[in-house]
Image (cartoon, rainbow, N blue to C red):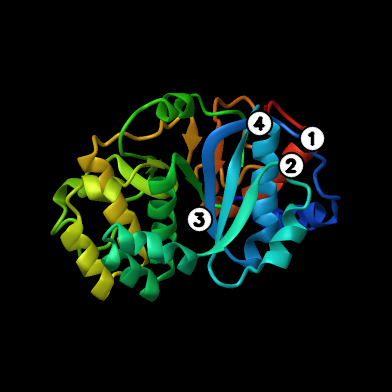
Amino acid sequence: MSLLRRVRDSAAYRSGFVYRGLLRALPAPRAAAKPEIPLTFLTFGGVDHRLMLQQCLASLYRAWPRLPRVRIVSDGSLVLVQAREALAWWPGTWELLGWRDLVPGLLARGHGDLVRFAERNAMGRKMAAIVASAAEGPTLYCDVDILWFRFPPTLDRLLGAPGPALVMSRDPYCAYDPDLVPGTLPDLSQPPYLCAGFLFAQGDFLAAVRVGELLSYAAERGIGLTEQTILAEADRQLGHEVWPEDEIALLEQDRHSLGPSYVGRPWAARHYVGQVRHLFWRDALALRLGLGDGA
């Protein structure tokens, strides 16, 4: 590798700290009221995710003509006063819940094994939040490391569809519980691989699929990847519908790039996982400054 390329690659990775610092120094976003959309925008996280959550929602406000109801389920570290400070600018409806607030409803629907999984693992708590919210109404679950560039056309169609539904996004890797895939669930070992960091859910979809044994396993021995595995199997049984790859981007090939990643792209949103987390801060700052062709 040439010296110039090493310097470029190092600059790309290290720049994330600079962009994050600049975002901290910016004033809170300015936002006027917008019409509502009949959707819960659900996310899960803690006190360390406040700045990322703020940028995620700032990009959504900029990109969407109508605003969803925001529900934040805390991992236990984020309290109401901290959430109010981070979201004082948000003009729509929002609420902060602890995952245990959802337990009575889950137990009433017979999801005791899911509750036991949540007791043991943070990803079980996230899964519990998704299941509980979907049972109440249409839900778009979104990790906080996602930025929005325009309204996703697929969402309009999903909101008009009846019945239980689960539509996950694509994952470039087969990131499932190795004790379940490929042994117990060989179909999941073939692409498209699915990611639980961005998904649409509606209705009591767990009751519409056969995953009881998987949930019993999760209650006893589940790990972080078990959540994504069970949801991927539920998605497969419900028709294996996946968000279009050119609408919700999850990729790592541009991790050494130095400019905004969304310019000239058709994406509605991008999920910044793994080796491209540093690009989240650069793109978030670019959006806040109005650069490029985000919505």
- Image location of residue 59, percent across then percent down: 67, 39
Please, is residue 280 above or below residue 262 in the view? below
Few, some or many residues within 10 Å of mark 2 (<14, 14–19, 20+): some
Few, some or many residues within 10 Å of mark 3 (<14, 14–19, 20+): few
- The residue at 82%/49% (across/down) is 28
**Residue linked to disc 2:** 91
- The residue at 82%/41% (across/down) is 30
The amino acid sitting under disc 3 is Gly
Q: Which is more N-terminal, label 3 or label 2?
A: 2
Q: Which is more N-terminal, label 3 or label 4?
A: 4
Q: Which is more N-terminal, label 3 or label 1?
A: 1
Q: Quadrant of the C terminus?
A: top right
Mark 1, secondary structure of its residue: loop
**Mark 2 touching mark 1, by CB under 8 A?**
yes
**Residue linked to disc 3:** 274
Q: Nearer the viewer, mark 4 or mark 3?
A: 4
The amino acid sitting under disc 4 is Ala
The Cα–Cα distance between marks 1 and 3, rounded to whole angstroms, is 34 Å
Q: Which is more N-terminal, label 1 or label 2?
A: 1
Q: Is residue 123 left or right of residue 35?
A: left
Few, some or many residues within 10 Å of mark 1 (<14, 14–19, 20+): few
Q: Which is more N-terminal, label 1 or label 4?
A: 1
Please, is residue 49 above or below residue 241 in the view? below
Q: Nearer the viewer, mark 4 or mark 2?
A: 2
Question: What's the mark number on residue 14?
Answer: none
**Mark 1 touching mark 3, by CB under 8 A?**
no
